[in-house]
Amino acid sequence: MPDDKNPLLIKRYASRRLYNTETSDYVTLEDIAGFIREGREVQIVDLKSGDDLTRQYLLQIVAEHESRGESVLPVGVLMDLVRSYTTQANSMVPQFLQMSFDMLRDGQSKMMENMTMANPMTQMPGFEALQAQQEAFLKAMTGQMGTGGTGWAATETPKEGGKEEDPGLDAIKQQLAELQAKLSKMDK
C-alpha cells in the first residue's frame, strides 16, 4: 500500500528508463505527472550515482506541457525566470513562487471549506451538482485534472467557426439554468 507521507521513489536506470519502486514497474513522465496531480510527492534518483534528478524531470514535464500548447506560464514570466538565473545571488524569485503557489493552494482549500460549512445554500436542491462543478473548475485552474489532462487546453474542443469552448461549459450552463428555475419556483 502506498505511503502518501513519504515521497514516491523513482529510480532512473542507465538506459534512462524510470522505475517505480512501490509498484515495481516502469513509468513514463506522464505517469509521474499523474502521481503529482494526485498529490504525491515524488523523488527521482539516478540508480548508479544516487544523484537527485527530481528538479530536472519536473522541468522536463513542465516543458512538455508548455510545448503541447497547455500553456500555464506566460512568456513574460518565463523571461523573468531566465533573468532570475543571472541575478541568483540576490534573487527572491524561488521564495516568491513558493509563497504564491502556497497561497493559491490555501485559498482553494478555504474556498471549498466555506462552500460546505453551515451554509444555508447547502440545503438548496442541486447544490451538490454546483459544488462538483466548482471543484472541477478549481482543479482545472490549478492544473490538477487527474485523468482529463492538465488545465483548459486538454479539455477544449473545436467548435464551428474556429472558436474553441470547454465541453463542460454547456453542462455548467444547463445546471445553472436548472438551478435558476428551481430558485424562481421557491420564490412563488
Image (cartoon, grey):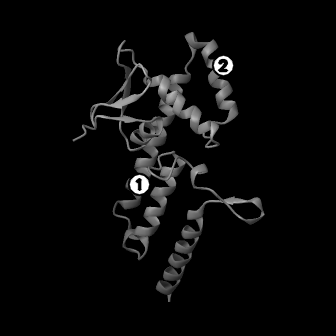
Find residue 162 and report its horizontal and vertical position in percent: 76, 59
Find residue 125 and report its horizontal and vertical position in percent: 41, 77
Seen from the viewer's position, the closer of residues 92 and 119 is: 92
Mark with earlier residue (2, 1): 2
| SS at circle 1 | helix
Seen from the viewer's position, the closer of residues 7 and 174 is: 7
| SS at circle 2 | helix
Q: What residue is shown with label 1?
A: 112
Amino acid type of the residue tagged 1 in the rendering: Met
Circle 2 crowding by C-alpha within 10 Å: few under 14, some 14–19, many from 20: few
Above or below, comparing residue 33 to residue 46 in the picture: below
The residue lying at 64 percent from left, 36 percent from top is 67
Q: Which mark is residue 156?
A: none
Find residue 138 and report its horizontal and vertical position in percent: 49, 52
Amino acid type of the residue tagged 2 in the rendering: Arg
Seen from the viewer's position, the closer of residues 121 and 88 is: 88
The residue lying at 43 percent from left, 74 percent from top is 126
The quadrant the N terminus occupies is top left
Q: What residue is shown with label 2?
A: 83
Please identify the residue farthest to the right as the structure is shown.
Answer: 161
